Amino acid sequence: MAAGAAGPEPLAIVLTYGESGVHLELMDSLAAAGLDPERILVVHNPARPGEPDPAIPAGARLIRSERNLGYAGGMNLGLAAAPAREAELVLLLTHDARLEPGALERLLAAAAAHPEYGVLGPALVLAGTAEPFSFGGTTGRWGATEHRKALPPGEIAECDWIDGGTMLLRRAALERTGGFDERFWGYCEESDLCLRVRRQGFRVGVVPAAVAEQDPGGPKRPGAWAYLLTRNGAEYARRAAGTRGAVGAIGRALREICMLGARIVSRSFRPRPGGREEMWVRTVGVARGILDFLRGRWGPPPPGLPGMGDLGNA
C-alpha cells in the first residue's frame, strides 16, 4: 500500500498470544489490504515458557516477550520498538481481529482528512456475523462505560473511547500521552488512553464505513475477565469522573455481586444455561477486583483466581 490518496502508510503492530495461529487470518486481511509486510511488527505474548514463535509473513519483524505482558505491556513493547520516524500513524491490532475489505483504506483516508482525531477505529461486528459489537464507547456521568450499538451517522462518529483490538493512533497523540498504562495489564487500558488523548485536545472517533470483525475473549477467561473489568473499570471511572466515578464503580460491583449471588441460589433449584460454577467464578472475580482496586493491587490477575481460562505465563 503506497502513501497517497488514502494517506500515509501506517506501521501495524500485531499482538499475538499463544499457539492457536488465529493471527494468520489477520495477516491475510492485511495482505489483502496491500500493507507491505515490512510495515508489520508482531509482538508475541507467550502463553507458556518455551513456546514456539508464531508464523509471520516474510519481511515482517517479530518481538518476543519472555512472559505474558497483557495488552498494555505488549503494545507498549511494540511502540517502543517503532521509532517516530517510521510512521505518522500506528495501527494496533490483536490477533483475533479481521479487517474487512476496504476498512484500512477508509481509516487512513479519514485520518488524512481529519488530523484533529488522535484515535480512530472501525465499526466492529462479532466474528463470523454481521451483529454489531461496538460503534465506539461512551462514558457516563458516574464513569460507567458502554458500547454504542446503533450505527451513528456521518463520516466519523465521535465517541469517548474505542476498543483496543483495532486502533489507528496518531503518533503526535501518542507522544503527548506516553502510551498505555501497564498497571491495567488488560481491559480498560484503551479507554484510559483515549481519555488522556482527549484531554490533550485530540478527538476520538469511529469510521462507520470501515468494518472489522472481533472475537471478544471474555468467555474464554470468565474469572479473569470479571476481575480485570471490575478493577480496571473502577480505576478508569475514578480517572474519568473523580470520586463520584469511584463511588459509582464500587456500587455497581456490589450490585453485580448481589445479582450473581441471587442467580447462584436460583440455579440451585432450577438448573438453567450458565450454571452455578460460572456464576461463582464471576462473583469471585468481581469481588476480588473491587477489593484489589481499593487496596491498589495492579498488574495481571492474582494467582489462584478461578476462571483464568486461557490466560497463563503472566
Image (cartoon, rainbow, N blue to C red):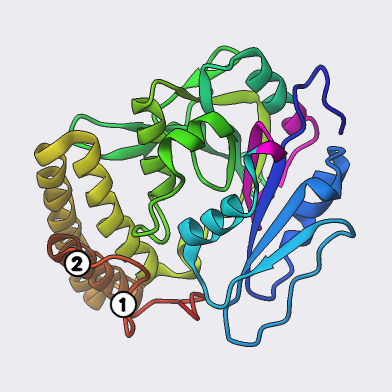
Instruction: Kindly identify which numbered label has been placed on residue 302.
Output: 1
- Could you say which quadrant of the image residue 270 lies in? bottom left
Front residue of 284 and 197: 197
Position of residue 198 relative to residue 55, above or below, is: above
Q: Secondary structure at mark 2?
A: helix
The residue carrying pointer 1 sits among few (fewer than 14), some (14 to 19) or many (20 or more) residues within 10 Å by Cα, namely some
Residue 251 % position (x, y): 11, 50
Residue 141 horizontal side relative to residue 117, left or right:
left
Q: Is residue 289 visible?
A: yes
Residue at point 82%, 26% (across, down)? 3
Can you tell which mark lies on residue 277? none
At which x and y percent is residue 226? Answer: 33, 63
Q: Position of residue 128 (x, y in %)?
A: 69, 49
N-terminal of the pair, mark 1 or mark 2, is 2
Q: Is residue 89 left or right of residue 255?
A: right
Identify the amino acid type marked 2: Asp
Q: Contact (CB < 8 A) between labels 1 and 2?
A: yes
Residue indicated by mark 2:
292
Residue 47 sits above or below residue 32 on the image: below
Q: Is residue 94 magenta-colored?
A: yes
Cα separation between marks 1 and 2: 10 Å
Task: Locate residue 51 relative to residue 237 in the image: left or right.
Answer: right
In what quadrant of the picture does the C terminus appear?
A: bottom left
Q: Position of residue 100 (x, y in %)?
A: 75, 38
Q: Is residue 223 magenta?
A: no
Please determine whether, in this image, residue 224 is positioned above or below residue 36: below
Label 2 environment density (alpha carbons within 10 Å; few <14, some 14–19, many ≥20): some
Segment colored magenta:
85-105
Query: Disc 1 residue type?
Result: Pro
In what element is the residue under mark 1? loop
